[in-house]
Each structure stands twice: as C-alpha cells, then as structure tokens.
Amino acid sequence: EAIASSARAKGAEIRTGVQVDRILVRNGEARGVVLINGDEIEAPVIASNLDPKQTFLRLLSANDLPDDDFRQQVDRYRCEGTSL
C-alpha cells in the first residue's frame, strides 16, 4: 500500500480487476493501454507486470516493435518468472 500511495501522490492511476488487451501505440510511441472492454487509457509512462515475452509479443503487434531481430531476441529470452 505504501508504494501505491506514493504512486497516487505523483498522479498515478491504479486499476485492479481489469485486463489489458494491448498497449496503445501512436506514431511509434507507447501512449497508453486498451482494456479488454475497449476503454483506452492514455499515460506518459506504462509499466507492465507481465514477463517480457507477454509484454512485447502479446500486447504489441509486430508492426509496433523496432524490427524482426528485436522480436526474435525477445522470443528467445529465457523467462523463469514474472518481472516488472
């Protein structure tokens, strides 16, 4: 709760019990998220508690990634747990 309180004091909005469908990308920059219900939330900073594979390969389309080499590197990344 201390971390959440500190984040809220800095303007963060924390939502629980909602599922992110994808990261919202505009003009090559992550601008927010789209929830599974279609709501769009724009934000200057986005944090993911999914592992890198889920974040980059599931929440972003291939067109939103820098290049195929980056995608392949993420795909080969060894994940043994979730990291933020």
Image (cartoon, rainbow, N blue to C red):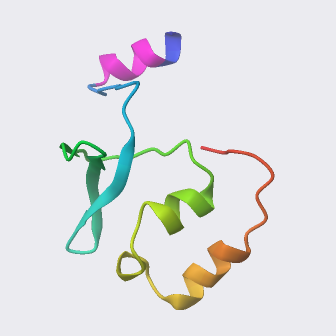
Quadrant location of the C terminus in the rendered image: top right
Magenta stretch, main secondary structure, is: helix
Q: Position of residue 50 (x, y in %)?
A: 57, 47
Residue occupying image coordinates x 26% and y 50%: 34
Residue occupying image coordinates x 56% and y 58%: 54
**Quick check: 34 left or right of 70?**
left
Q: Position of residue 32 (x, y in %)?
A: 27, 50
Residue occupying image coordinates x 52% and y 68%: 57
**Residue 6 magenta-drawn?**
yes
**Residue 80 magenta-drawn?**
no
**Quick check: 32 left or right of 50?**
left
Q: Is residue 37 above or below residue 24?
A: above
Q: Position of residue 47 (x, y in %)?
A: 45, 44
Q: Position of residue 41 (x, y in %)?
A: 21, 43
What span is in magenta?
Answer: 4-10
Q: Quadrant of residue 8?
A: top left
**Quick check: 53 left or right of 22?**
right
Residue occupying image coordinates x 51% and y 10%: 2
Please state the total of marks drawn on the protein image.
0
Of all residues, the one furthest to the front in this rendering is: 37
Q: Is residue 67 above or below residue 77?
A: below
